[in-house]
Image: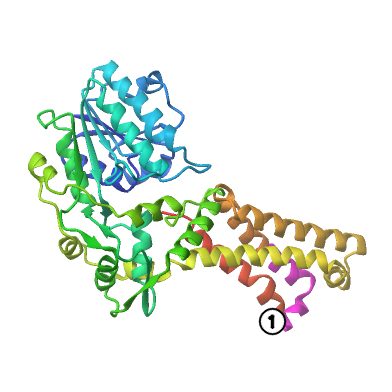
Amino acid sequence: MRVLVVGGYGLIGGYVLSRLHRQGHELVGAGREIRAAARRFPYARWVAADLAAMRRPEDWVPHLAGIDAVVNCAGALQDSPRDDLRAVHVDGALALYRACAAAGIRRVVHVSAAAVGAGRETAFNATKQAAEAALAQLDLDWAVLRPGLVLAPAAYGGTALLRGLAGCPGIIPAVHADSVVQLVSVEDVAEAAARAIDPAAPARIALDLMHPEPVRLAELLVALRGWLGLPPARVLRLPAGLARITAVASDAIARLGWRSPMRSTALAQLRMGIAGDGETWQRVLGLRPRSLAEMLAGWPSGVQERWFARLYFLKPLAFTALILFWLASGLIGVARLDQAAAVLRDAGVPAGLAAATVGAGSAVDLALAVLACFRRSAGPALLGMVAVSAAYLLGGTLLRPDLWADPLGPLVKVIPGAVLALAALAMLDER
């Protein structure tokens, strides 16, 4: 069949694409940012489609020509400048499904989430429920799949955070360590989606996708640490108040475009637990899910997994240090303008030009620090930091080569800025 996979470059969407490709389907991937996706999944044809912006059925008509089935894997965790839950989960998704009904595309698979029922009052839960209820009213052969806590060989989102916690030196810090979750392999989710698009598969059904055996968060973290090959460590149960503080801070930086897995919605879902019916989907789809032990046994960890886990929390520290470094550089230049300009005057630069050069450099430093705070502008800002560091290095060498006799000159001003910027640039992808 020709299958449209919306959100096809996310964790679940990527595995769904891979599974359908192995079955021989012709694939069309859709999403907001498709340039990297086209390189990662060259066997699919990619179209730019933003659920948040495409809220009318006619917006989807050009992308549905010749399509036999649709799998919607798109979703968001929390409202932010980059995400609108109502638009993504409800308005855009229903516009797509109504367009499918009008085009005669019967088979629609909607990937939702487990444990979004009544009594779990978050916008994530409310919009997921609204989408499922509205889809049920349409004349389509729909299937709603509700994965539990998804584990995968790849590190992604909240499960990447779990690896980071499991990899902490000496201890395993955990908030809500006794919360109960039911797990599912991303490969089993992809297999379920592949079976659900079959025209002969049961339709108009909603299935929880998860292993029936519940696991406590502390047990999961201990298992992940063993999988990483790290020495055993005790679980340090952190107070719930720390989770609230972390959530407030994570929600704040989300306004700058950084989608932390420690935002309030993620922590609320974890606190309430993730559970459901792990039996029915096995009977309906004829699929036996892998247990936690079977998942980890099938994904042998290597040096890259240990590196990722060990260095996971280095990223926010590196960005914080980087921003503070360039902020301090700019402020010091402003506060000590005369002393800094004197270095250039001693090299023969006219007094007025020396002062203007130091002032401009300080302004650039401050601008780079501010731009690095925003996810959208962080990449160009980091490249700018490397370029400015190189300019400082070259300018200092040409104008005052004697400064190299004092290693603190280049070491304090130039080298840390460049090294930190390069490290942060390597870690820029928040997934």
Of 241 and 325, nearer the camera is: 241
Residue 331 located left or right of residue 306: right
Q: Which residue is drawn at 73% across and 72% down?
A: 397
Residue 276 located left or right of residue 235: left
Is 409 a magenta residue?
Answer: no
Q: Is residue 423 visible?
A: no
SS of the residue at dot 1? Answer: loop
Of 408 and 9, nearer the camera is: 9
The residue that disc 1 covers is: 407
Of 72 and 276, nearer the camera is: 276
Name the residue type under label 1: Pro
Residue 208 located left or right of residue 341: left
Residue furthest to the front in view is 119
Which quarter of the image is occupied by the N terminus?
A: top left
Of 138 and 339, nearer the camera is: 138
Query: What range is drawn magenta here?
Result: 391-406
Residue 141: x %, y % from top left: 19, 26
Residue 354, compared with residue 129, is above or below; it is: below
Residue 70 located left or right of residue 130: left
Q: Can residue 178 be seen in this view?
A: yes
Residue 357: x %, y % from top left: 82, 60
Residue 160: x %, y % from top left: 36, 60
Is 405 a magenta residue?
Answer: yes
Q: Which residue is drawn at 26% across and 75% down?
A: 229
Residue furthest to the bottom in view is 405
Residue 309: x %, y % from top left: 37, 68
Residue 222: quadrant of the picture: bottom left
| Predominant SS of the magenta segment | helix
Residue 415, compared with residue 14, is above or below; it is: below
Residue 420: quadrant of the picture: bottom right
Residue 418, compared with residue 268, is above or below; it is: below
Count residues near mark 1 (Cα–Cα under 10 Å), then give few for <14, some for 14-19, many for 20+: few
